[in-house]
Amino acid sequence: MAVRSSACFFDCPDACGMWVESDEQGQLVSIKGQAEHAWSKGTLCSKTSLYGDVVRAKNRIQTPLIRDAAGGFQPATWDQALELIGSKLKALPGERILGLGYSGNMGVVARKFPERIINALGGTLTDGTICDSTAEAGYRTVLGRTIGFDLQEIESCDVIVLWGNDVARTMTHLMPRLKAAVRRGARVIALDIVRTATLDWVSKHGGLALRVHPGSDAALALALCDLAFQDRAADLKFLKDHCVGGAEFRAHVAGLVSMEQASEITGLQESAIRELADVIHGARKPMFKLGIGWGRRRFGGMALRAACSYAAVIGAAENVAWESGDHFDLDLGLATGEDLRPTEAPKGPISHIQVGRAMETGRFGATLVWCHNPAVTVPDSGAVRRGLAREDNFVVVHELFMTATAELADVILPATSFLEQFDLLRSYGQRVLNFVAPSIAVQGECRSNFEAFAAIGKAAGLPESAWAGSSEELCRNLLQVNRGRFTDDEWTRLQAHEPVELHGKDYDDWGTPSGKVELFSQAAKDAGLPAMAEYQPDDGGGHSGAFWLLPGPSKFTHNSTFLHSERHLARLGPPTVSMHPEDAEAEGCQGGEAVRIHNDLGSLTLKVALEDFVPRGALHISGFVDETQVPEGCNVNQLVNGDLNDMGEGSTQYSTRVSLTRLV
């Protein structure tokens, strides 16, 4: 038996540490939490603890597959698959080759090394804007670097605001720290548009659990800014010394959103808004944990700007936690290979949100997919599927299972799990860095992202300098390039594959164009955006429908990762759409009744679940559904349009409007 240090590479801010036990043949025996990990401290979520179901799955792809003339797949050798891939890529100019990767595996090498091969080919990459680009743009406009408050210090705060964050479900290792803070007397506030598990927990523990109308966050934040000035709770010294536009912003918010207007827009009683302000303004050290999802609206970037501006007004700008990516400050150029890109190759990526539209036009003759299931996870997924299905688009998918994307491939290459490869892992929610070695033997003929794409690069005729080496060598070289970022102790521990909570760097400025917190942003103004945060009603992008569509993370699956696990599908249950009982009554619907949810992009036929956690006027779908149980054979992103929102070229997922039609 052997026990090795590892980490969870799911797209999750916790990025837990774990011990992996294997037998004499290198087969997985068990996965356990790693007590030595500074953040997860020995516990794992119910998804990671069952990752063995993925590793050992009988339906896992373990040999290359090539589509035959009849449309089915036939097993092939790696040499056969690579010869076919190489011949197709050699026949295409670089700009007609699309690289389509995302966050199915959050490892630096797994995500970034394939980009090196695409860059060397002169191919086209996407801007990766599905998830958090809008929230990031809004945050950066005001507060600069995405380092933020260290959540390890949350117990030092006396008021904790969880804004658009269902941390009980999506950041479970924050919960023990919240409980400890409450025991020390902290007051917790949770704001969300549905009654989440976090709101229920906060309510149970004496906090403020507030449900606001979808798209109303900016109005609430700006009303709170005005109240802060009225209540003399604004930190005028901080505004003067550390902010750009403090005076202008004060004049801007004065009467911009009155209490009456804020109440009407948010659905909160004026007394609730007043209590919210009193609790925050009376705090010694308030902190804000801002979520990612509420940026995925028509004006999501502006909402983040407003919330960050409010924190700055009360002198709590350093106490905002959004994401922690800039904490690591690593140079990843060796992995991404921008320097290998031919000078004549097209510059810049294309929109990830609108990649389906680009593929539909026939722009690409080959598409290489890794760490991604775009037929399910990208907005306007109908366009994505049509683009992948084009006969003139040669599609290669590197994958563990026969996903909806893999079903549209010409060649499928078997991928390793994250327990079978070398990689580096940075969290985007905490500050631990991992250098992980394989903890079990490679299953079947699977290859890591490095091995698969290095072989593709070689087959496509790229010079050896583009693809030579190994994933371990690349990891060590990346660490060496960034040696100055680590203390001697951190360096030694990383080499021993221990999880390392990196020390924080000192900066002389905030990382904005002015170097200060920017309540007034000249850069935003120059880009045609408002110079200061504003509230703009969500118009649904001009799309019609009686209901907001509010997809949310599933308690039992993780994105589309576990849609091929029998145990997880059984826990997930039949696909349903949740709606408020009063809306169901108005529509004449009964619980368990099949209805069609639809708009001009497509439809989903699902059974109704009556749930009062859903607000009136909205429909909720938990996670990605099992498409085999949906008559249309598609998923929720079939209904989400590919429009871009106000900042960061992100998704308008939560601005989706749909209609509901009974089938009886």
Image: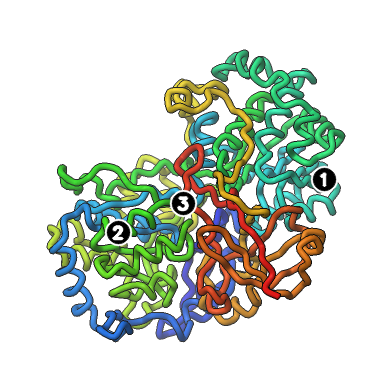
Q: What residue sits right under mark 2 in the picture?
A: 114
* Residue 340 pos. (x, y %): 19, 48
> Could you tell me which residue is drawn at 67 percent across and 54 percent down?
547
Q: Amino acid at mark 2?
A: Pro
Q: Is residue 177 visible?
A: yes
* Residue 289 pos. (x, y %): 65, 42
Report the front residue among 128 and 148. Answer: 128
Q: Which numbered mark, 2 or 3, is in the foreground of this view?
A: 3
Q: Is residue 415 left or right of residue 31?
A: left
Q: Amino acid at mark 3?
A: Gly
* Residue 216 pos. (x, y %): 68, 39
Q: Is residue 120 visible?
A: no
Label 2 Cα crowd, 10 Å radius (few <14 / some 14-19 / many 20+): many
Of the numbered discs in the image, which one, if any, rests on residue 207? 1
Q: Which numbered mark, 1 or 3, is in the foreground of this view?
A: 3
Q: Amino acid at mark 1?
A: Gly
Report the front residue among 162 and 345. Answer: 345
Q: Secondary structure at mark 2?
A: helix
* Distance between the alpha carbons at the discs numbered 2 and 3: 25 Å
Q: Earlier in the sequence, mark 1 or mark 3?
A: 1
* Distance between the alpha carbons at the discs numbered 1 and 2: 46 Å
Q: Earlier in the sequence, mark 2 or mark 3?
A: 2
Q: What residue sits right under mark 3 in the picture?
A: 642
* Residue 452 pos. (x, y %): 28, 68
Label 1 Cα crowd, 10 Å radius (few <14 / some 14-19 / many 20+): many
Q: Secondary structure at mark 3?
A: loop
Q: Quadrant of residue 169?
A: bottom right
